[in-house]
Amino acid sequence: MARLLSVNVGLPRDITWNNRTIRTGIWKTPVRGRCRVGRLNLDGDGQADLGGHGGEQRAVFVYQIESYRYWQMQLGRTDFVHGQFGENFTIEELPDDAVCIGDRFRIGSAVFEVTQPRVTCYRVGIRTNEPRMPALLTSSARPGFYFRVLNEGEVGAGDDIVKVGEADERMTVAEISALLYSPNHPRDRLDRALRIRALSPGWRASFEALLQSQEAGTGSSGNPGLAPAAAAHPVAPGFRTLVVASIDRETVDVVSLSLKHPDREPLPPPLPGQYVVLRLPRADGSPLIRSYSISGPRSTESYRISVKVEPNGAAGNYLSGHVHAGDVFEVSAPRGGFTLQSGERPVVLLSAGIGATPVLAMLHALAAARSTRQVFWLHAARDGQHHPFASEVRRLMLALPQGRSFICYSKPDPHDKLGEDFDALGRLSQAVFEDIGIPHEADVYLCGPARFMADMKQALAASGMAPERFHMEMFNGGESLMPGIVGAAMRAPHPPKDAADSGPLVSFARSGIAVHWKPSAYASILELAEACDVPVRWSCRTGVCHSCESGLISGAVAYEPLPLDQPADGNLLICCSQPVRDVVIDL
């Protein structure tokens, strides 16, 4: 009979790793005597990263002593102790290839249900002193599994584990894990997995994404069940030569350029909200890489980009002062996951300054379709001279039967007319959202300066809108995801202190940083990005979770270690890749 060998608990603690401070609850130690099990936790236990661990669906993590023995043999280790893998219950029997999602067990006076396999992260590599462990656990089909607590009670080492129920649809922990993380996602198995009522919402969402991708015919490469939104809509790497067809001054500090194919060949149609990457020449021959949202209507004839000219902005000043109609540039295909979603929900297009560009493309799409959705155009500017696209927006809003515009000027000049050029003095705020009556179920598309974005997120949340309805575009890189890292200083991207002067050139397009690859200093492009303070997202650091999946704008990479499942064509996993020639990356 299966048996509970050890109950292990531990509260979050701060540790030092790679010159960083990490808060983690992975250090667990055995409990003497019996332990109370609550709905979310065992007494004396806690999780630091509630985004990836803990909660109702992941209240108790379970790992088998047979897997301990396997890893001791594989790694030549004899130093493992109960709790080494961060588990709350060290058990005997119940292997991952026999236990099914939805199986229910009584241990002591508590009753539990299996909800999902473990999602491994880098911290298990720290705890076991084996950096490869996140990938090894998944590739070996020995991830362990989570319980949710059906009936609270007490447990203790030596308790029998008694099976008291099971799901109608039988799929083992190992099968469910492989269905998500391996390259094979058969439709019939996805259907079966989604029929398991006990499957946790996070895993269910991943399988639904895989299924939707197959139904839409877009599942030819990559893993939509894992890829973050920022890595959606991948396109083939490379640049094409486009010619400047026209240049228009929008405001005192914004200029628009229309780009066309020199032979009038059709261009890949952008999705509303996407951007292109330009590779601009410099006097010294090195490229200047910049990304710009497509600000005009969806077209295969031309792309309009609009650029703010900053006093010390190299690219903006070059495009504003040295470019003429007929000049040619190297331009990527449209890319990016900040795109207008279909549906019937209300739409809020919320921007400040040059942040209007991607949401303006969305407004063009809604107006062209004469959408009957509620559409709110909310924009903040300094004054009329710094308010781009004002007349264009007014014209587009006329095509929307349920459209409403609201403009705030922070410092209007004497020529600006209240009620005509702008609607309110000051800034957009929670009070404005509530006065306008933005529906709580609306999808919000948000773009602007970093401080504006942070303030708007806070105001939207305070007004009762759900964070999952927020869609954000950041010009200078995306939001970081560095689970467990505490006290990390936010710095502007910069070349590393030990920058090399030769080797493949790695350009981070959104951050405006280009540095040579130094293999003796960095094991992966992720490590190079971290040395440059480029905003990055990661979790496993070993090619399993795809949190770090990013767009490969040009160039090629090699993988070491090999990821369990390849990213989509046109993307890369920065956590385990190295450049084999010059690369441009969408970070």
Image (tube, rainbow, N blue to C red):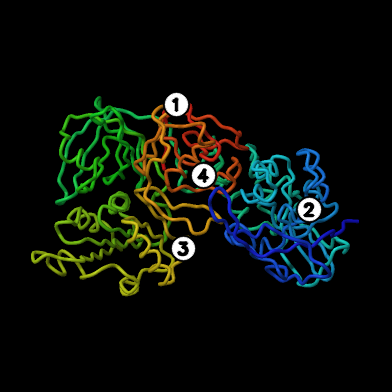
Residue where numbered disc 1 is placed: 581
Q: Estimate the spatial distance between the alpha carbons at disc 4 and disc 3, rounded to whole Å.
A: 21 Å
Residue where numbered disc 3 is placed: 467
Dot in front, 1 or 2:
2
Secondary structure state at the residue bearing disc 1 = loop
Circle 1 residues within 10 Å: few <14, some 14–19, many ≥20:
some
Dot in front, 3 or 1:
1
Dot in front, 4 or 3:
4
**Which quadrant holds the C terminus?**
top left
Secondary structure state at the residue bearing disc 2 = loop
Q: Which mark is residue 548?
A: 4
In-front residue for pair 516/443? 516
Q: Amino acid at mark 4?
A: Cys
Circle nearer the N terminus (2, 3): 2
Please say if the residues under marks 4 and 3 sit with CB atoms less than 8 Å apart: no
Q: Residue at x 11, y 65 (%)?
A: 413
Circle nearer the N terminus (4, 3): 3
Q: Amino acid at mark 3?
A: Pro
In-front residue for pair 84/224? 84
